Amino acid sequence: MKKSIVVLSVIFGLTAGVACASDADALKQQDVRICEAKAQQKTNEKGQQADKSCECEIENTDYEALAEAKQKGDLAKVQKIKQEAKEACAE
């Protein structure tokens, strides 16, 4: 009985790591779709600038850390990660 619990714990830990990676990919794809939708809504020069800013934030976001923070429910960490990406693009 104890062995099966240990084995299940190890399996759960491994799948959680894989889930975190796939969550990171899903979060990135979601941001890409949002970015594309914003670009389609704004066809003028201002929209193109917003699109570049959006792409920059996607490139500077650590999606693995973001997925892990979301999974843990650490909203402060989520906000910090997003803020760091915005600040990297403001320079």
Image (tube, helix red, strand yellow):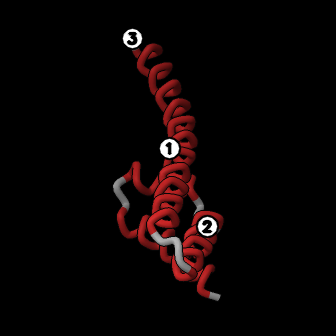
Where is residue 67 shown, x and y percent of the image?
Answer: 48, 52
Secondary structure beneath dot 1 equals helix
Q: Name the residue type under label 3.
A: Met
Which residue is labeled 3 in the image? 1
Mark 1 and mark 3: Cα distance apart in space = 32 Å
Instruction: Looking at the picture, tell me which residue is in the foreground, 73 or 43.
Output: 43
> What residue lies at 50% left-to-right and 62% top-to-bottom?
40
Instruction: Looking at the picture, tell me which residue is in the foreground, 59 or 68.
Output: 59
Residue 66 can be seen, yes or no: no
Q: Callout 1: 10 Å neighbours few (<14), some, many (20+)?
A: many
> Where residue 55 is drawn, which disc sits there?
2
**Is mark 1 in CB contact (under 8 Å) with mark 3?**
no
> Where residue 23 is drawn, which disc sits there?
1
Q: Callout 2: 10 Å neighbours few (<14), some, many (20+)?
A: some
Where is residue 89 shown, x and y percent of the image?
Answer: 61, 80
> Where residue 61 is drawn, which disc sits there?
none
**Is mark 1 in CB contact (under 8 Å) with mark 2?**
no
